[in-house]
Image (cartoon, rainbow, N blue to C red):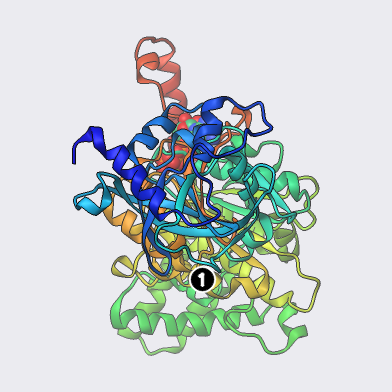
Amino acid sequence: MSEMSSHAAFEAARTASAGAGSPQPGTMPPMPSAAPAATMDNVHRPIGVVRDVAGGTCIVVFDPDRLNECLTDTDPSIAMSGQVSSQIKIRVGNTWLLGVVRTLRQAYTSEDHGGVVAEVDFMGEGDTERLTGNIFGFRRGVTRYPMPGALAHVATRADLRQIYASDGRANIGIGTVHPTRDIRAGIYIDSFLGKHFALLGSTGTGKSTSASLILHRICELAPEGHIVMIDPHGEYISAFRDRGHLLDVSNLQMPYWLMNFEEHCEVFLTSSGSDRVVDADILARCLQQARSKNRLATAIGKITVDSPIPYLLSDLVNILQNEMGKLDKGTGTIPYQRIRSKIEEIRGDARYQFMFSGMLVGDCMTDFIAQVFRLPADGKPISIIDVSGVPSEITQTVVAVLSRLVFDFAVWARDEETRPILLVCEEAHRYVPAERNADGSSVARVLSRIAKEGRKYGVSLGLITQRPSDLAEGVLSQCGTIIAMRLNNERDQAHVRAAMPEGARGFMDAIPALRNRECIVCGEGVSIPMRVSFDDLDEALRPASADPSFALQWSKSGGEDAMIDRTTQRWRAQSR
Ligand SMILES: Nc1ncnc2c1ncn2[C@@H]1O[C@H](COP(=O)(O)OP(=O)(O)OP(=O)(O)O)[C@@H](O)[C@H]1O
Ligand SMILES: [Mg+2]
């Protein structure tokens, strides 16, 4: 079919198949609006016809000439009509069905009249506003499917405004709905936090800045919140100077005795294989004895190796020494010596002082919990824990202790009034790696447990990662809301696609083509999946992750000597 005749043939086919009650081109009454003529025309003249209908999708044949006409429309939602991931509406009796274009291809059979054949996913439906013909009362899900021959129309800005309007639940605005520049994209805070969330995107797409934006908005809405953010690069300190309680190795003061037995093993045991079993056995016995020496233990009665009861490291060393003395001289003493020398090494290492300092022997558990979990918030509902200064060999364990404390605290506070806690974890793939990279670490276990059971105890998890394919699949699938920024890697895309709900597939295909600061949000936290352009975040509220300007920095010099001196100094002192 030639290009000249395709539109006419298309019109004829469409007119023939149009059902009763469907608006016909040219027969619409003039609309009571000051909108430009082109917009009104594009609103009322259909852009395509439904050809096949299946469960959650249909095939629509678009009229390419109509799409071209829409392209120049001043309403960006209309101008985008028919493109991949654009929204369209389909007339079903008196209701409108909203769909998202997933794929497009050129027609290759004559029955499609030279049109553009699109696969469209259904998103939900709404009634027709009598005066304007817009959608109103939008709801998720489909109760009435279209028949083949139903007409497809553009979804206008007014439609999108209705569709994305808040339903009254508490929400935070994070940006604007694409392609409009004024319709606010809102996240329903209870559903968003209630079922965990994941923020995914390739490096530099704006994850950390978006996470700051979301957390700032949450803090504005919930000044008495309890948020714990684990910050592996110390980026968030600058973003939360006013609102955050900032902790790093210089002031964290996390007592070593808060570790449970498994975490103790990760820090104190150096052996592997069968030796490790022997060492673990010895450590368990001696640790229990050391804990039992505390008067708290006497008051409580029965305690276990996991009970967070303070003990003295020197007691533990002495007990190891005594136990060793009871043995006949020989090979049996090696495990004791191994553990003892590791403990001594850690005690003497300045980098470990934030956790193993002699100052931390007192019972400061309640103070520690109060300050880290922001109970009470005291105007700073978020605590930023910068673990960048923690020696890398125990970072995992430190994160494990913090995460486990959040969970255990929630479990033991079950009889109290619930005070939900949000735990946000940057670079989450490091802590809960995919099964193929799993190393059986305690942090992976505790985060997986929070992902599975946290909701029941009011613990919410926020996972941020640039490599979703390296994140344990089970954990990703527990995230009720997924915020996907651009992902360049195909394996990452496939993982996110698998974790996304059915209806979001049309948007999903746009993920490789998203611009920086754009994302697809789908799942529990939003009424329907949407593509969002994040708001510009005030510079003072951004994390310290700005891209360096090579052009600028490499065109000036000065002060290098002093800079190197200062850096070397910090490096040697191992403190900032
Ligand atoms: N909403 C926003 N407002 C202002 N600037 C932004 C916004 N989002 C991103 N940027 C800018 O984009 C750049 C990269 O952002 P960001 O550091 O958040 O990316 P990232 O995805 O966390 O990267 P990485 O994976 O390397 O940690 C920064 O310079 C940041 O200032
Ligand atoms: Mg980042």
Q: Nearer the viewer, residue 148 or 474?
A: 148
> Where is residue 571 drawn, in percent x and y?
43, 36
Picture residue at 74% right of the left edge, 44% below the top = 220
Q: Quadrant of the N terminus?
A: top left
Q: Is residue 103 left or right of residue 145?
A: left
> Where is residue 274 drawn, in percent x and y?
30, 83
> Where is residue 477 drawn, in percent x and y?
45, 68
Task: Establish if 279 lies above or below 397.
Answer: below
Picture residue at 39% right of the left edge, 52% below the top = 16
Q: Is residue 283 left or right of residue 117?
A: right
Q: Say what secondary structure mark 1 lies in.
A: helix
Q: Nearer the viewer, residue 575 or 120?
A: 120
> Where is residue 551 drawn, in percent x and y?
35, 15
Task: Establish if 397 lies above or below 165.
Answer: below
Residue 544 visible somewhere in the drawing? no
Q: Where is mark 1, residue-wise?
A: 446
Picture residue at 50% right of the left edge, 32% below the top = 76
Q: Is residue 197 left or right of residue 291?
A: left
Q: Amino acid at mark 1?
A: Val
